[in-house]
Image (cartoon, rainbow, N blue to C red):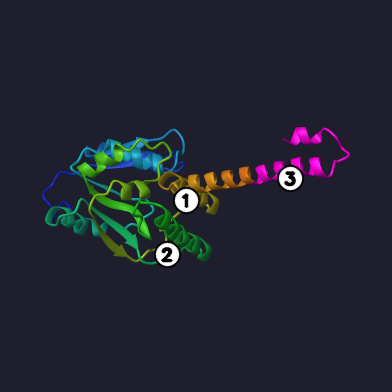
Amino acid sequence: MKQSHDADFEFIFVDDGSRDDTLSIARQLHRDDSRVRYISFSRNFGKEAGILAGLRAAKGEYVAMMDADLQDPPALLPQMLDALLLEDYDCAATRRTTREGEPPIRSFFARMFYKIINRISDADIVDGARDYRLMRRRMVDAILDMPEYNRFSKGIFGWVGFKTKWLEYVNVERVAGETKWSFWKLFRYSLEGIIGFSTAPLALASLLGILFCFLAFVGILFVIVRSFFWHDPTSGWQSLVC
């Protein structure tokens, strides 16, 4: 990137409460190169907290974000920057065309999630979308202005509505380590995304509430009619029900 584009760079590493040598390596990189900065959390706060902290710390006119599991190909960065410099795009994002290395059941539910949320939400969330992307400053500022508490970045990226170019690549397995995202963590994360970017759960809850109120009203009418015409020998309980 430095050779192909005459620009100033900064590198920000977010250490999300790691228990290995990540923090010491980041400190050494900072001592060796003043362009390198790092943020260290006191414990693991999750991916969304790391993304938010990194975006808040970034000062450049163009901001790229990338996971540290080496599944995001850095070779795409020059192409992503060209999309913003030479074309009319505010964001160059990536999506994987395969789910190599994932369990089949996890891939199935991931595809179902994208189908469901795109059907019930106004946010444009592309199937296979990664957090790996390059954005203009105005898009970053719009993301930071979102007052979400439980953040769902994939939904926020689509919600802010900037013009995005999608670059595809073939997914590869992690180079080292294991993902901390269990099936149930992903399931809960998906529910947060659906609740945060769709009114469908609220509408469903309202419809169910109306339905149960109607059934309760019918039940009360039945009890009243029965007490008048059939004279239930157990007196007094009708008033308790009503």
Distance from label 2 to label 3 (Cα)?
56 Å
Asked which quadrant contains residue 14, the reply is: top left
Q: Is residue 212 left or right of residue 145?
A: right
Amino acid type of the residue tagged 1 in the rendering: Ser
For label 3, the residue is 222
- Residue at image position (28%, 52%) is 133
Pointer 3 local density, CA inside 10 Å: few below 14, some 14–19, many at least 20: few
Is residue 27 visible in the rendered image? The answer is: no
Give the x, y percent position of residue 38: 32, 37
Question: What element does badge 3 sit on?
Answer: helix
* Residue 242 circle label: none
Which secondary structure class fits the magenta region best? helix
Q: Which region is colored magenta?
A: 215-242
The residue nearer to you, when weighing 84 against 70, is 84
Pointer 1 local density, CA inside 10 Å: few below 14, some 14–19, many at least 20: some
Amino acid type of the residue tagged 3 in the rendering: Phe
Pointer 2 local density, CA inside 10 Å: few below 14, some 14–19, many at least 20: some
In the picture as drawn, the residue positioned furthest to the front comes out as 229
